[in-house]
Amino acid sequence: MTGALLSMLYPVSVLMITYNAITSTTYALRSTSNVCMLQNRFHPGFVSQGDYVIGGIFPIHSTQEMPDQNSTYRQPPVKCTSFDPTAFRYAQTMRLAVEEINQSTELLPNYTLGYKIFDSCAHPLTGQRAALAVLNGVSEVDSPMCSGASPLLAVIGESGSSQSIVLSRILQPFRIPMISYFSSCACLSDRRKFPNFFRVIPSDDYQVKAIAQLLIRFNWTWVGLVRGDREYGRFAAQGLLRELKGTKVCVAYQVIIPLLYDRERILDIIQVMHISSARVVVSFLSVGEMTSFLKDYMMQNITGIQWVASESWITASVYTGSKYYPYMGGTIGFGIRKGHISRLTDYLQTVNPHIYPNNPLVKELWETLYGCSPSLSSGSQLPPCSGQESLLEQHSAYMNTSSPRVAYNVYKAVYAIAHSLHNLLLCQPGSGPFQNKSCASSTNIQPWQLQCYLQEVKFNIAGEEVNFDLKGDSIPYYDIINWHRGTGENIEFVNVGLFDGTKPAGEELVIQEDRIIWAGHQSEVPVSVCSASCHPGSRKAVRRGEPVCCFDCVPCDSGKISNQTDSIECTFCPDDFWSNQDRTACIPKKVEFLAYDSLGITLTVSSVVGACLTMAVFVVFFYHKNTAVVRVNNSELSFFILFSLTLCFLCSLVFVGEPTSWSCMLRHTAFSITFSLCLSCILGKTLVVLAAFTATRPGDNIMKWLGPKQQRFIIFSCTQVQVVTCAAWLIDAPPFPSRNTQYEHSKIILECSVGSSIAFWCVLGYIGLQACLCFVLAFLARKLPGNFNEAKFITFSMLIFCAVWMAFIPAYISSPGNYADAVESFAILASSFGLLFCLFSPKCYIILLKPDKNTKQHIMVK
């Protein structure tokens, strides 16, 4: 609709406009005359003559009643309703600023400003009507319609961003600058679309940045978003979502308040807010939209929501009533920077029906504040006023001048125009501070010339510097406002911090948290998260199909840690470290080896006991070396076997304790050589037993080949094979201590790596070969005659030996870490005890307990 209207606007002497949708300001060119006549009237609220005229457009009414759109008859004008004393105060602030400038001897001396103030009714359509009316000069009777350019130099307005967009596009063909005091939509910073637009309120680009920092500051990661269906809400919401992208904050829902209030839809929105787990709601609504919404919101008795308000309604005086606190108390938001206007209070008190008896806006002010009619007209349904009414501070909607914010913006906007016009009038071609600027005659100043000076104006007012950047925006500065409970349960707007957009990134937000009262009159920061934070020791696992703020906390796996809250991933510990029980820190891995604990001590004691028993048997045999049992069983080989068994028992001691290079090499080599020596002796003894019994047969001469020298040679030769194998093993790939971290990741197992697996299994295989050979030979000799047949004991001992070592192999392979050493040590001890008891316990029994059988006659019975 706006584009169609703009296509019909021409800054020429003949202005033809058809605007049937509103029909309030309609011009037509009569075919019979060149006179352009006004077909309908739209009276300004306030008018003042001056050398230079500026316009003002304010939402003095907040709602409107649209006429019937039936075009078969002439429609009546739009009826504006719901008088807004706050917006009326803004209009009076403009009038005050103009009067101060006209009285100043320094600013615009010898020149006066005039003004023409209209009501936009807080709607783009009626705002469009006001914009067209403001272009027509001070009043309709001053000059013929459509003759010459408009005397208007600039416009102060509008409040809403939607209205400002319409107003800027209407003024743009005429190159008339406008300064908004309350339109913050970031869309208006586009200089290509709105080259004539300026504002003394920061762009929403800064506000959404401030709100995003606020949400992050208080760890509100799950928030709702309520916005209006106009440019302000749409662009602000888009900007906030853009700022939150890449942060930890997610939007749980985004709801839109419709342009035409639909109570059924509003109730659905309230239900969404009520059931959502988001306890923080960000709102980008105008005062009118928010007021309508709050009626149903409070009716549904919704409490416990922490509101984050935009600058559009955070300081609106309409919400100071006590009825709002139970539902909206604790609201926090960003307000426009407040200022000081010294004469404003006194000036507002001069506006009354006695001074302006015919002004309908003043009449409506009185009716709104006092509920009485200052006029005696019969059309009024209110009782007449007594005439004694006077404006008091209790009329906060109109008389709230303690900390003006929007009104202060209006004040600054008027002074910005005045200073720019002053600089333009001072311009002297080729000289002075403005010599490079376009100059104009004081009697022929064009709006576009004023716009050029507005772009670079800079002045101080009440200690604040006012200027515009290249986009027409002002310095980004906000007060952080918190709604406290004041006297009489009313709401007080308390300043708890500030946002200064000129400071370096990360330093803009300054908050006094101890002064903040939160929703529900609480002192603790409310929690608004989709999922509770994951504590150290766990990581976030995003739920499929849900926002990243909704997640499950998964404990870190073993060997991984997270030492921060809400970690995305768990990190691996270094090789020599492992995670503690809480998975919050890496601690050195527990080092394990066959130490002198209960198991190690048991093996050590068993080893020492075995060695002592062997030595005791050696002593017994040595003491009774001349007895029949000792002599018949080849005492020299018996002593060799006892000596080797002693070494076998002592070998197990090498397996206990922390592995070292020497202990690792000694473990397997000493064990293999001593056992090979022991088995070589047993093999020699088995051969002697066989030879002894077979030699009794006629013609046998075997014993001469198994004399003492031959026995020693057999023992030496068999043992030498193992010695050579071990020597080659130690030279080529000796065993070495290693740190095993693979078998059990939480521990470091100190063990001896065999170095060469082939050599290891070769020495074990050789021992097994010797044991099997002894077993076979002894088994063949088991039934040879004799009262004391040693072949039976050798057979039984080899059976035990082979059984132990056959069980050792799978047990050794499957045993974890230090238990492998314990298994090998146990196998050594078990096989050694088996040999000791099987070979020597029967002899010791005869020697010590049955000495009567320790005779040659007894042995030779058979």
Image: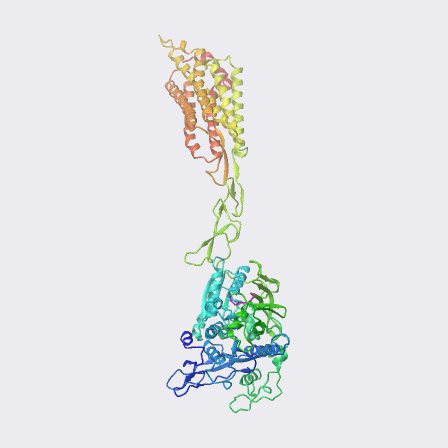
From what the image shows, is residue 227 above or below residue 812? below
Q: Which residue is at 44% across, 55% downward?
A: 542
Residue located farthest toward the front when viewing the structure as drawn: 430
Q: Quadrant of residue 334?
A: bottom right
Q: Which residue is at 59% across, 84% downward?
A: 352
Residue 405 seen in this snapshot: no
Decide whether the magenta segment is chiefly helix, strand or loop.
loop
From what the image shows, is residue 693 above or below residue 370? above
- Could you tell me residue 307's position as x and y percent? 53, 67
807 and 690: which one is in front?
807
Q: How is the image coloured?
A: rainbow
Taking the magenta stretch, the answer to whether it contains residue 472 is: yes
Q: Quadrant of the N terminus?
A: bottom left
Please state if 396 lies on the left or on the right of 166 as rendered. Answer: right
Which stretch did the figure color magenta? 471-475
Please state if 547 lies on the left or on the right of 357 as rendered. Answer: left
- Could you tell me residue 155's position as x and y percent? 52, 75
Q: Quadrant of the C terminus?
A: top left
